[in-house]
Image (spheres, rainbow, N blue to C red):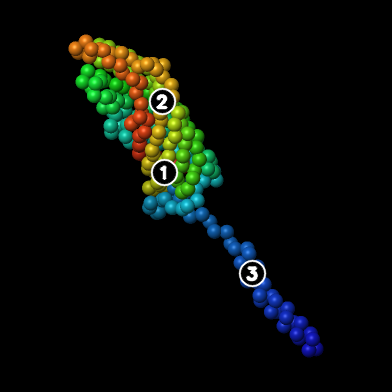
Amino acid sequence: MRNACLAALAALSLASLTAPLALAADPAPVPPAPHGPSAPDTQFPSHHFQLAAHAPERVQLGFHYGLIQPLLYSGFNAAADVRYQRFIATYSHGQGLDMTSTVNATEKAAGMKLAMPWTTGGGVGVLLIDELYVLADFKVHRWEAEVGNQKAGYNTVTVGAEVGWRFFVWKGFNLDFVGRYWPNVWSNAPNGVAFKDAGGHTFVHEPAHQGLGGLFGNVLAGWAFNL
């Protein structure tokens, strides 16, 4: 009888020790915090900061509009991107940009007007942390320069990189802060275009670059939703 009691006590003691371990080994799954399009209407802002990448488990589609283009260059730029897990693919198109403010001192003195009738292309990239991402971009740009009655048009191709971070304000509405380096890798006017100023002096307009030698930034406003 004594041995039977001791065996029962030992079994109960062992069960009491192993039960918490068994519970700890199988915790209930914690649902991800609501973020962006998945956030409830009452959550403001709808951005949930985290170190891990916000990698959508379903395909996510986003549309964006650049704010710098209408404010500084009297044109527009629209973009769309597709995201799935950490993969990103983008396409953007700009139209009717007045780039006269970017000409150099010699061109400005000659009265040059510089326009970008269109710019188009896309990129692929990956999410890093939170909503921070990097892209490799390929773009084609059309330029048209004018001095008096002298006109010339040419194309450039840029291959570069982009880094951006997206912040969700409410539901799918977001602001995207981007920095880009798009250097020229090709032009159909590699030696530039010759013009004459009012005094009859010849000067050469070199193929234009995006921003400062290909380096520039932008702020995009857009909406993203899960398919």
- Secondary structure beneath label 1: strand
Q: Position of residue 178 (x, y in %)?
A: 39, 39
Q: Give the residue type that dot 2 points to.
A: Asn
Which residue in the structure is indicated by mark 3? 21
Residue drawn 40% across the image and 46% down it: 167
Answer with the quarter of the image where residue 79 lies: top left
Q: Position of residue 86 (x, y in %)?
A: 53, 43
Q: Position of residue 187 (x, y in %)?
A: 41, 19
**Mark 1 Cα within 10 Å, few/some/many (few <14, many 20+)?**
some
Taking depth in this image into account, of 98 and 205 the one nearest to the observer is 205
- Secondary structure beneath label 3: helix
Q: Earlier in the sequence, mark 1 or mark 2?
A: 1
Q: Give the residue type that dot 1 points to.
A: Trp
Residue drawn 40% across the image and 54% down it: 43
Q: Nearer the viewer, mark 3 or mark 2?
A: 2
Taking depth in this image into account, of 123 and 221 the one nearest to the observer is 123
Q: CA distance from mark 3 to mark 2?
A: 62 Å
Which label number is shown at residue 165?
Answer: 1
Q: Nearer the viewer, mark 1 or mark 2?
A: 2
Residue drawn 41% across the image and 43% down it: 165
Q: CA distance from mark 3 to mark 1?
A: 42 Å
Q: CA distance from mark 1 to mark 2?
A: 25 Å
Q: Earlier in the sequence, mark 3 or mark 2?
A: 3
Q: Give the residue type that dot 3 points to.
A: Leu
Which residue in the structure is indicated by mark 2? 184
Residue 165 in view here: yes
- Secondary structure beneath label 2: strand
